[in-house]
Amino acid sequence: MSRLITNPEEFAADAIDGFVKAHPRHVIAIDGGVMRQAPIPEGQVALVVGGGSGHYPAFAGLVGAGLATGAACGNIFASPSAGQVHRVGQAVERGGGLLLAYVNYAGDALHFSQGAERLRADGFDVRIVPVTDDIASAPSGQKDQRRGIAGALAVYKVAGAAAEAGQSLDAVERIALRANGRTRSLGVAFSGCTLPGADKPLFSVPDGRMALGMGLHGEPGLSEGAITDAKQLSQMLVEQLLDDLPEGVNPLTERVVVLLNGLGGFKYEELFSLFGAVANQLQDQGVVIADCECGELVTSLDMAGVSLTLFWVDPELEELWCAGADSPSYRRGLLPASKPAQQQTGQLQMTTMSTAGSRLIAREQISLLSPLAAKPCSLEEQAVSQQVLGDLKTSERELAAREIELGQLDAIAGDGDHGLGMLRGVNGALAAAQAIADQGGDVKALLIAAGEAWSDCGGGTSGALWGAGLRAAGTYLKNSTPTDGDWIGALGAAVTAVQQLGKAMPGDKTLVDALVPFQQRLESGFQAGETPDKTFQAAALASQEAALATASLLPRLGRARPHAEKSLGHPDPGAMSLAYVVMAFSKARTANSEG
């Protein structure tokens, strides 16, 4: 996608920095993302949206008066972390409560739910609305499992308008849920998208073919068909969307807002040609178009693709859709003039650590992650911290060596960023752990800080799960010089945290398939009185064998679920990355023992 020489780890943060500088009238940079420049009235509901970068104008481009109050901005195709959601929410809340809205992907669901828990712990009233408009990603009986695409604009727009009008949090939540329930989308792709710094697309579409039902993050389509002309494509899209009408909607008596969305490489003249055919198809079906948008509304880097959204409005929703809004990428109607940005600076003091949450956490900020960092430790306790720090360094080396392999494995049924996300996560965790160790902190503080940083820097599902596991392990430890039994207990706490957060069980084709056998073999070896080295080697081997065995499983959770058949015969990337890490630990332990 990128034409310039690009550092993939810094690309998203650099883009966010430039976006803020390019739109000073609309947005302000805060830690974790951006917020609107227009002052937020006291008592007004705050709408926080967010997701991975690479989808502009979603999500930061929709921040402004009459739309989103703030956006949490993740790395390319990776959800923002729970910490980012928490910090953006803190920055924009003005006493009216918070509505968090995101497109329904596993990583976003995990991080936004965790962020909501933290905000509730701060005393805020928080509601969550995932956008689930993509009819290709799950059948009509499983609407809550569907992904989000360009229908997010409809949900954000009416929710933002309701908040701007001073409606209560209950009302804004009700309106957002109603808009989501009355929105349906379907898309096609003609080529894959290419991650910054990559030399080839995440997936390819054969010449003369198109992929139906591609995902917003570049996941391959659910089926393929021959390329058609605009009339035939419009007929296919309209017919399938009319076959999946929201409950209670009569297309002959209700009005619809039509959104035709280019995904990055499907440009305006061709969009206009297709929109004309869509409008004719709807007219032929007796459908009345209340309003429309035709352009790039939510993209997927440089993917050549297009999606059609039908948003079935009632009088209330139509009025809110037509209300004024002023954001970098979406403007309509008139709004009262906003005051200068300087008048908000006092409100932003708590969120000035960085301009983009996707950057690695600065060393001087690490102490903010855990109040335990400054606890004085003995030399013996510091030695334990150094040992865990060494394990993280081993993890970093292994994941760096496996980055491309894990990305290619992830691209089979996902978005291809698993290797990069894991490397970002471990780099952040290592920086946080090093800072704690340099301060003489104990292993509890080190693990908690490393977990928070892994979540913050890694993003996505894996970032949330690894972060939760490390934090749970650190929280469990009561002794700064843990025994083998303490470590077994800490691992058990980590497994519990991962399973509770991700809702995965062995057999679901996730990292849990490699994690649980590792834990069980460690525990059984410890109880049998085996030597620690023998137990660890056997447990690492069990993890590796279980990870490889996921090749025969069909995914039941996460981003690969809609592409279950594509993943058959290939092991789960999350399970493999965990197995690679514990195998690297085992080899390092063996080398140290022999040395």
Image: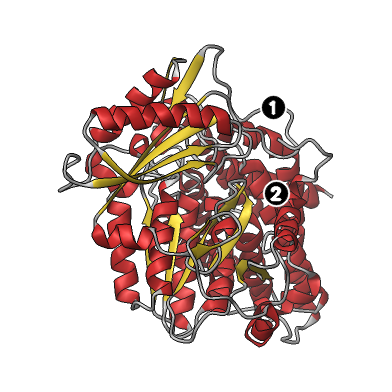
Image coordinates for residue 33, horizontal then vertical, percent: 63, 65
Residue 483: quadrant of the picture:
bottom right
* Residue identified by numbered label 1: 200
Q: Nearer the viewer, mark 1 or mark 2?
A: 1
Identified by mark 2, the residue type is: Leu
Callout count: 2
Residue 423 tag number: 2
Q: Tag 2: Cα neighbours inside 10 Å, few (<14), some, or many (≥20)?
A: many
* Gap in angstroms between the C-alphas marked 1 and 2: 20 Å
The one of 9 and 253 positioned closer to us in this rendering: 253
Question: Which residue is depicted at the point 82% across and 74% down?
Answer: 438
Question: Which residue is depicted at the point 43% across and 73% down?
Answer: 164
Q: Are the residues at dot 1 and dot 2 in contact (C-beta closer than 8 Å)? A: no
Image coordinates for residue 247, horizontal then vertical, percent: 18, 47
Q: Secondary structure at mark 2?
A: helix
Question: Which residue is depicted at the point 43% across and 52% down?
Answer: 152
